[in-house]
Amino acid sequence: MLKINELHVSVDDKKILKGINLEINAGEVHAIMGPNGSGKSTLSNVIAGRDGYEVTQGSVTFKGKDLLALAPEERAWEGIFLAFQYPVEIPGVNNTYLLKAGVNAKRKHHGQQELDAMDFMQLVKEKAKLVELDASFLSRGVNEGFSGGEKKRNEIFQMAVLEPQLALLDETDSGLDIDALRIVAQGVNQLRSAQRAIVMVTHYQRLLDYIKPDVVHVLVDGQILKTGDANLAMELEERGYDWVREEAAA
Amino acid sequence: MNQVNPLVEQVREQGRLTFNRLGIPTMRLEHWKYTDVKRAMAPFMDHLGDPPAEAAIDTTAIDALAMENLDAYRMVLIDGRLHQEASALPQGVRADSLATLLAEKPEQGIEPLTTREDAPLFNGFVALNAAHARDGVSICIADGVQLDKPLYILHISSGGAAHICHGIHIGSQSQATVIEHYTGSEDTAGFTNVVSQVRLLQGGSLTHIRLQQESSRQTHIGRVSVCQQRDSRYRSHSIALGAALSRVDLITSLAGTGAACELNGLYLTGGRQHADHHTVIEHRAPYCNSREMYRGVLDGRSRAVFNGRVVVHEGAVKTDSSQSNANLLLSARAEVDTKPELEIYNDDVKCAHGATIGQLDTNQLFYLKSRGLSEDEARQLLTFAFADEVLASIDIPTVRRHIEHAAFSKLPHGVDIEEILV
């Protein structure tokens, strides 16, 4: 589904990613772990299409299409979703309106009929239950005045409504207390399916206690130094990241 | 013409003399340096005091210009003259035509026409208004009255010069909403010169909505002057959408302990429109509170001016004041001049002010696009949201909707406005 080949990315002439190779297939859950500053967020931002990242080398394809040639909204229509590490507040833009516009833009792109207000509200109410989001959040401004936990729940709620094929969860566990973490993880687990791939970008192993990955990658200094199964995450939790660096150097 | 009372004649004469001395403000004056009214005023200079011809505007035309489905006491002024048949003056509240008052109770009638020359932002237009304002609405709400419906003053311009003067008196512990709505048919190129004098007695509360939606060729000059007694509340929503050139001065004096004001403003300009807002908040008493938020969205080659002055006088301890002006430029050729001014003459105060001029937030844009909204759609949504934050505090839904519709349909859009407003 997603193929990343020899990807090099710079920000303000500073090399952040130095040759990433990664293949993610439908139905898989991947975790990308690494210390701060290793390039984790850069990777998810490049896939989602944020400005300010210069791809100097390599390619990213999604379902065979050149992803890097697409605008962020086109990537969304193709089925890519980024759950933000820091979801922005957009006062005055109604949460439900945003989702309806998003869902219908995607449907239109695929030649499907747009959902009417009734069908849409039905869908939204059903999905809100998934992350135990109170209905009052639906009519509020996007993330406006939400607590840290509410913002992250709102991200997963949006993911549920937009039904992406590839979901990138950028540090979704940061700033969550244990109850919120459990709710968010439950939501994500319910969204696991054979047609969908999920990539969790995280610093800690904590989230992986709740959402068990099929594959774990260790990203250090802009390169994937090691790939393994869920046990690798446990090992990182115990031993830190230095041994991976040393092993790679040897 | 009926005979003119000497009191009224004295006010008129004073206005004429002052105007002859001051004339139309020029760009040499500090408070008019960004707003050139000379060209806009040229067609009117020879007949500034002439009463406009009686316009034939029927009730269908009036209803078409009025806010839809608004449950209010309506008063209609056509070219500055009260239209009796279309107006319903409320019971229990004294709302007189200024013309009637001047004829029957001149000593009361001249009150709103009298502005001292040393008042903040006094200029030739105020004198001109005193010399020529024939009509307006004089509202007097007795003590302890909670008005059940807003007072809606609809102004229709059909061209020519209209000088209008309103007096709004809110009694002690009384509460009211007054809406001044300025309109005209699209092809009119008139001149509106309006002065509103507001007085709030102890514990009185007024929500004052001022919507300027005149034709794109109109010249609009307005002045709102407010005096607030102890514990009174004044909340203003000043919205400028129409006119080729508009200038609105809002001066409020917090004269009694514990008084509070909230000034909200929104101007949307396009084409070659020019919109100027000057405000002065005078903190003259202890424990007063002022909040001011003005926002502007500028497109085309339009130009806006904001000048907000907050003065905290010596005895005004425990003053709490905040002021902000934010501007969004949609076009590289639009221009805004903004100047918040703060003058503080005692130490025991909390004051904050700031102004910004900018484009849309790139993080917000990316967030919306990552959810599947196109670049255009995301930009429109953020622009609407920026403007709507000022309107959110209007608590009469019909009025808020009317303004949102009028405002958003002015902005470049492709999205369904109706849906955003859900």
Image (spheres, coloured by chain):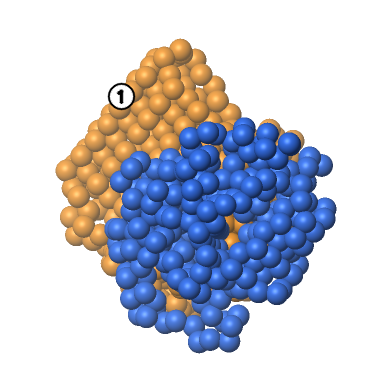
* Label 1: few (<14), some (14–19) or many (≥20) C-alpha neighbours in 10 Å: many
Query: Dot 1 corresponds to which residue?
Result: B257
At horizontal 37% and vertical 80% (from top left) the residue drawn is: A119
Q: Quadrant of residue B308?
A: top right
In the image, B32 versus A32, the foreground residue is A32
The quarter of the image holding the N terminus of chain A is: bottom right
Asked if residue B20 lies left or right of residue B109, the reply is right
At horizontal 44% and vertical 77% (from top left) the residue drawn is: B64
Rendered blue, the chain in question is: A
In the image, B207 versus A45, the foreground residue is A45
Position of B68 relative to B107 (above/below): below
Q: Colour of chain B?
A: orange
In the image, B294 versus A193, the foreground residue is A193
The chain letter for the residue carrying disc 1 is B
Position of A80 relative to A209 (above/below): below
What secondary structure is found at the residue carrying circle 1?
Answer: loop
At horizontal 65% and vertical 63% (from top left) the residue drawn is: A23
Position of B212 relative to B258 (above/below): below
> Residue A230's x, y, as percent?
49, 51
> Residue A246's x, y, as percent?
68, 34
Q: Quadrant of residue A47?
A: bottom right
Position of B20 relative to A216 (above/below): above
Q: Quadrant of residue B188?
A: bottom right
> Residue B374's x, y, as percent?
62, 68
| Residue B160 visible, this orientation | no
